[in-house]
Image: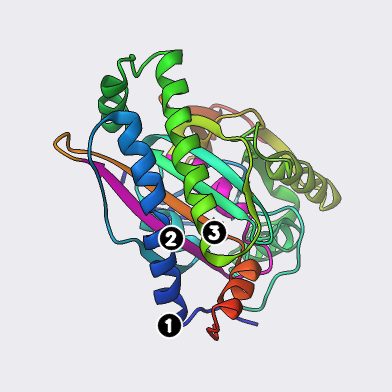
Amino acid sequence: MSGGGQMARMGEYAVSRDPEDRLTALGLGSCIGLALVDRRTGVAGLAHIVLPVGTPLETDPPVKYAPTAVPYLIERLVALGARRNHLRAVMVGGASMFAASSKLEVGARNAAVVRELLERSRIQIAAAATGGKRGRTIRVYVGEGRVTSRVAGSAEEDLVAAASVMAFA
Amino acid sequence: MSTQFNDVALDALRELANIGSGNPSTALSSMLGRPVDISVPIASALALGDAVDAIGDAESDVTGIILGIVGELTGSVVLLVAPEDAETLCGLLGVEADSEWGLSALGEIGNIVGASYINALAAMTGLEMEPTPPATVTDMLGAIVASALAEHCDGSDVALVLDSEMSVEGDDCAISFLLIPQAGGVRELLGRLGIES
């Protein structure tokens, strides 16, 4: 494990306003890693969303389904001091890992539904790395407001560069 | 409603996976011309978040061969082969692991092992189960396993995983194969075995 920070595993989320913190979702396939960042207040969150639709059980983890995950993450960030209209989104994942065997297209539907939910919540998507056939890892560097994606066998790449480099909104 | 499975149910599933893995190990053994051992499977009902970690390092590279199961019990069978084991297996079959032939050979191993596992489970339970054509990918373990779990986790708050391992005698080479059934189908199956879950 490339140590430090908080992990968002399947159906889990992490939020932080500690500038030293890093939020990670490892090995996203059809799942979506949704990062929401408010650079002005330095608050960031990451949700590891599993399915585009469905009825959550009371005992399900909080961000398993996209329709409940997006508002839930926004709420948690606002509670931590983020301003709703300053939030910018980064989406990673939604791949189709087994093109030949799966007819469900969970990945593509995940990406489409999360995109639509963000639009409806009037949250701008700053960057996205979705679709295709490869798995990805997303990392959110809370203090820098930087978000990266990594594909198997490749180096980590910036999707959104550090705050000092790129003016946000 | 929580979807916990009790110890009796998990024991029954483990035994089912144990007997069911006899066929695939025979199939692999005749492909490779080597004796193949099987370990006692692990049956677990885990929180979705814990499931990938229980199988391996989410970001590690692995070759996965996945077969869907259609019929009365739906789910997936996923074979996972670590890079060094892929090399050994391909060596035994006389192909380069890092080539198209290598990937195709691993896919064929997965196809034969997976299909014979599914057929054995069908024969034992009397449930209609058919394998779908396999897909072979080399990628992050988490991306492969989580995508398989995602397809079967709606309506259940646990991930049910039956994890078996085959090892090729004398070659220090192992393949793990997972059965990820849809939880509703497993209830039906346990019911037929006369077990309350």
Viewer-side residue, A85 vs A118: A118
Above or below, comparing residue A55 to residue A94 in the picture:
below
Q: Quadrant of residue A102?
A: top right
- Relative image position of residue A71 (x, y in whole percent): 73, 61
- Relative image position of residue B67 (x, y in whole percent): 56, 42
- Residue A85 relative to residue B176: left or right: right
- Per the rendered image, the range of residues in magenta is B141-168
Query: Which of pointers 3 and 2 lies earlier in the amino acid sequence?
Result: 3
Q: Which residue is the site of mark 1?
A: B8
- Residue B58 relative to residue A54: left or right: left
Q: CA distance from mark 3 to mark 1?
A: 22 Å
- Relative image position of residue A66 (x, y in whole percent): 72, 56
Circle 2: is it few (<14), some (14-19), or many (20+) Cα within 10 Å? many
**Residue A138 numbered mark, or none:** none
Q: Quadrant of residue B60?
A: top left
Viewer-side residue, A71 vs B98: B98
Query: Which of pointers 3 and 1 lies earlier in the amino acid sequence?
Result: 1
Circle 1: is it few (<14), some (14-19), or many (20+) Cα within 10 Å? few
- The residue sitting at 74% across, 47% down in the picture is A114
